[in-house]
Amino acid sequence: MKIAFATTDGLNVDEHFGRAGAFAIYELTEEGYQFVEIRRFAEGRDSGIEESEGRLHEERVERKVDSLSDCRIVYLTEIGGPSAARLSRRGMMPVKVREGTPVEEALKRLLRTVRTSPPPWLRKAMNDG
């Protein structure tokens, strides 16, 4: 299962979903995890989303969701209700964490949960891929 992390440095979860210019993507299995790639939407913050309004804003957010749609979990510091609903409709779980949470720490915690007592949604996500 792929996991996305909203990040500016590839090491820490430190960005809001909409304005995140990059997401670190990892593959997680019950055996462990490994880095896959960085998906870039902008250098630094995604000002295209931040500065847009109305239909253009909605289209840009939808493109970001589309490009992350192979990920089952998206770690971030904040997310608006409409964006969270978009992720949820696609079978993606947004997970809010404290700003500066190390990606490695989040992965280790998630792996422990997967191995010990995953909630039903996580068990389904692992089985779906």
Image (cartoon, grey):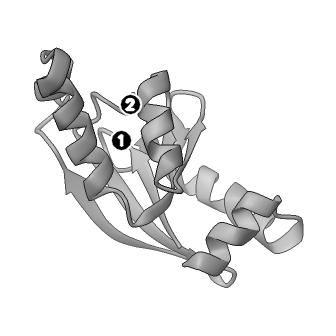
Give 8 or 5, whichever is nearer the viewer.
Answer: 5
Label 2 sits on what residue type? Glu
Residue count near mark 2 (Cα–Cα under 10 Å), binned few <14, some 14–19, many ≥20 = many
Q: CA distance from mark 1 to mark 2?
A: 6 Å
Which residue position is annotated with label 2?
A: 15
Q: How many marks?
A: 2
Q: Is residue 115 above or below residue 90?
A: below
Q: Answer yes or no: is residue 78 visible.
A: no
Q: Residue 85 in the image: x percent, y percent?
A: 50, 36
Please state if 102 lies on the left or on the right of 116 as rendered. left
Q: Is residue 48 above or below residue 37?
A: above
Which residue position is annotated with label 1?
A: 7
Which residue is found at the position 13% from the left and 18% from the top?
52
Q: Answer yes or no: is residue 98 visible.
A: yes
Asked whether disc 1 touches disc 2, contact meaning CB atoms under 8 Å apart, the reply is: yes
Callout 1: helix, strand or loop?
A: loop
Which residue is found at the position 43% from the left and 40% from the top?
86
Image quarter in which the C terminus is found: bottom right
Which residue is found at the position 80% from the left and 62% from the top?
120
Label 1 sits on what residue type? Thr
